[in-house]
Structures are given as C-alpha cells and as structure tokens.
Amino acid sequence: MAKTAKGLVSFVKTKIGNPYLYGFKQNYAWNKKCTKDDYNRLKRAYGSLIWNSDVKCIGKYPCDCSGLISAYTGTLRGSSEYKSTAIKVLPIKDIKKAVPGCALWRHGHIGVYIGNGYYIAEDGSAYGCRKAKVGANGWTHILWLKDIDYSDAKKKDTKVEKKNKKKDTKSYYKKYTGGSVSFVDALMVMGIENTFAYRVKIAKANGIKAYVSTKKQNAKLLNLLKKGKLIKA
C-alpha cells in the first residue's frame, strides 16, 4: 500500500512526546526498546551527540529525526538521503507552497510539515518529538519525499487554519524543569545558545529592551522559561 502524505501527518502526530536518541531507529511496529547496550554503543560511536541525560531512554522507545519518517514509510533513509532522493525541493522561503506531509530539512536534521505553519519532528534530546512553528528550527528547504504519495495532500489551509494562524504568531522555548537559579545555566541545559549577544535578542523578544544581564532581568527571563512562556528570539 502506498504511503500517503495524509498518513505521514497522522503518524507523526501520534509520536509527539516520544524521546529522541541520536542514531536510534524504529521499525514500522515501533517496538524497538532501547537497552543499556544500545545506549553505550551509540555513546561510543557518536560521542557528545549522545547526551548523558539520554540515559533516560533506556527501557523506552526513542527515535531520531530521520527514523521518525522511516518508521512510517518502511524505507530507512538518513536526512541527507531524503534530500538527495526528493522528487521536488524548494527553499524554505517558499513555505506557502508546501503541503502537509512535505518534509522540512536543514543540514543534519529533518521534520514533517503538518500545515498551518507547524511541523513535527524528533527535535533533539532537549525536546524529543514535538510540534513547533516552522520558524523555530532554522529549516532551509522543503522536500517532497520519494517515498510519499502526495495526491491526497491539501493544497491550501482551511479558513479555520488561516484564522488560527493569525491568532498564534508567537513561538516559545520548551518549559525548563531543572533546579538551576541561573538563567545562563538553564539555557545551556536546554541546549539553547546562551551567549550575551543571544540573550540580548531573547530579552528584546520578551519586552526587555535595555538588557545588561542584571539579576532582576535574568530572574524575569528564567521565570518565563520555567513557565514555558519565554518567547523565542
């Protein structure tokens, strides 16, 4: 049976919240449990790409970004191979031409466009499989995948989707659940750039125009991050 764009979107929606583990693949049945040996093997092979905190994946069913799509199609490909075999490729600036079920791609990473300005991807150890705004991940290209039949894909957003798109224009960093009292350290733990220059941009996006990294300013930003209300720069 052909693998459809509609089917791909439905499939990835069921995986939101699933843990991410670099280099780990699932099959179509999604029944491959990560063992301690798997974790240690990947740690030896990929070094720092496997976070120490990824040990939490042991006993669970993690997956990496390309594996999320491969689990649906039944054809194993890496992110670069998805781009090289795509039947159509457009730059991300043409996102309005994308249909749900297209892939979003940047070097070393891939996700699935689900329409209405959102994508779903196994988005790294800090996020796992999540739904996020297209602008949240530095995507560079839109792919129509060789393994997907796009004849069932919607051509345009519905009126309801267009209305929701106007309402929800902000994108937020994932909620920080750690115990650090340092905004800089919390960003580092979350895998977010924590340089002063980038913190200035985050502060500006969150209504702090004259950010100089004072205790009060950082406390406000950390509080927003803990609530999941820190607007992305």
Image (spheres, rainbow, N blue to C red):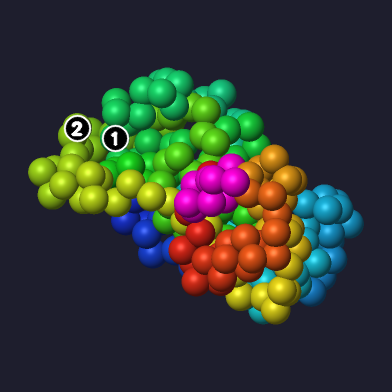
Magenta stretch, residue numbers: 201-210
Mark 2: give few (<14), some (14-19) or many (20+) Cα within 10 Å: few
Residue 116: in magenta span: no
Q: In the shown orientation, is residue 22 left or right of residue 14?
A: right
User: In the rendered image, which residue does mark 2 sit on?
Assistant: 155
The kind of residue on which mark 1 rests is Val
Residue 209 shows up from this direction:
yes
Residue lying farthest to the right in this orientation? 44
Residue 99 badge:
1
Question: Dot 1, how many residues are within 10 Å of its Cα: few (below 14), some (14-19), or many (20+)?
Answer: many
Residue at screen point 52% across, 34% down: 139
Q: For the residue marked with disc 2, what is the amino acid?
A: Lys
- Residue placed at 80% from the left, 67% from the top? 52
The outermost residue toward the left is 159
100 or 92, which lies in front?
92
- Residue 210 image point, x, y percent: 59, 46
| Location of residue 171 in the rendering, given as x and y in whole percent from the top left corner | 43, 51
Q: Are marks 2 and 1 in contact (CB under 8 Å)?
A: yes
> Residues under labels 2 and 1: Cα distance?
6 Å
Q: Name the disc covering residue 133, or none.
A: none
Q: Is residue 173 left or right of residue 41?
A: left
Secondary structure of residue under mark 1? loop
Position of residue 152 in the picture relative to residue 41 (left or right): left
* Horizontal arrangement in the rendering, residue 64 relative to residue 112 (left or right): right
- Residue 10 in picture, x, y percent from top left: 32, 56
Instruction: Answer yes or no: is residue 27 visible.
Output: no
Residue 75 in the image, given as x and y percentages of width and height: 52, 43
Q: How many marks?
A: 2
